[in-house]
Image (tube, helix red, strand yellow):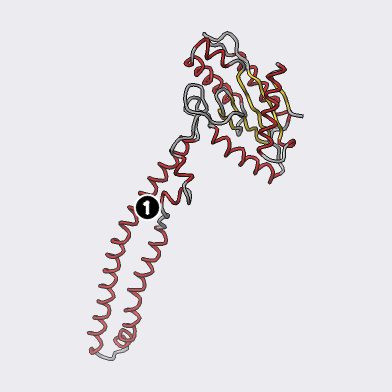
Amino acid sequence: MPLPGPAGYNERPTAGRALLIRDAPGGPDAFLGESTNLRLVRLRLFLALVTMFTIPIVIAAPFIYGLTSGMGTPLVVPTVAILTLAIVLGALTVWLARRVLEPAERLEQTRRILEDAYDRARAEALRDTLTGLGNHRAFQEEIERQWSIATRGGRSMSLAIMDLDDFKRINDSSGHAAGDQVLRQAATTIATYVRRGDRAFRVGGDEFALLLRGAGELEAREVVARIVAAVEGNIHPLVRTLSASFGIAPSAGAKEPEELLRIADEAMYEAKRSGTRVEVAA
């Protein structure tokens, strides 16, 4: 599979500067800052408020008991004073709590805005702007994730690599604008005919990759057969014929994602050389 090249017509899409945020030391948290736990702040302020009320009341309890026991009026003044102190301290605590929570809530709101902006930037950085499919960076991340899920759960998966045949001829004879339209049409076809849960990516100029979850050789063949028929059935005014070559690699034949990719790539080039359209790695 070709390495990423410079951006341009029909070239591999680049991830974009937004990935610098994700790849920075410390990850997104280093950019977004520590999350403000408002629940914890509110809980601590509530406990402080309860404490401010409770301590004077506890102190006043003997005096209140004396009053209720008929010990006379000398206890009225200290009792009222202590209860007044409790009210003042409670009001002061509420005021301080509001002053503390205001900047904390503003900080939390800012953090959420930054998180949303980061999520949007990351989604855009992992999307091929021409076709709307995942780009090469998204493919690299997803194949690692799907491989981990499949190996931990003892499940199968398949990787299919698709390459449009004679795409250079389309660019040379009809122009890059026509080539771009063919790529978009191919991407739409792929997205239409893959199964729910499968993922499709544009990983090169005219190369696409399909991650087929839970698919063995038979299921992968069925998905690819539908896509091949649909791609060859598409008619573009400037392109009389269009075909694609597929290489399929079930996960059972590989020990790591890099090997799975290599096997699928080799199968695709064999399909292109032999003209069989679809080649499944042995």
Residue at 34% across / 78% down in the picture? 55
Q: Is residue 270 above or below residue 121?
A: above
- Residue type, label 1: Glu
Q: Nearer the viewer, residue 57 or 233?
A: 233
Q: Is residue 210 above or below residue 23?
A: above
Q: Nearer the viewer, residue 161 or 234?
A: 161
Q: Nearer the viewer, residue 35 or 53?
A: 35
List the single residue furthest toward the bottom. 71
**Quarter of the rendering containing residue 41:** bottom left
Residue 241, x across and y down, in percent: 60, 10
Residue at 42% across / 61% down in the picture? 40
Element type at mark 1: helix
Graded by Cα atoms within 10 Å as few (under 14), some (14 to 19) or many (20 or more), the crowding at tag 1 reads some
Residue 64, x across and y down, in percent: 31, 84
Q: Is residue 131 above or below residue 256?
A: above
State the quadrant of the N terminus. Answer: top right
Residue 133, x across and y down, in percent: 53, 29
State the quadrant of the C terminus. Answer: top right
Q: How many marks?
A: 1
Q: Mark 1 = which residue?
A: 108
Residue at 68% across / 40% down in the picture? 256
Residue 7, x across and y down, in percent: 47, 27
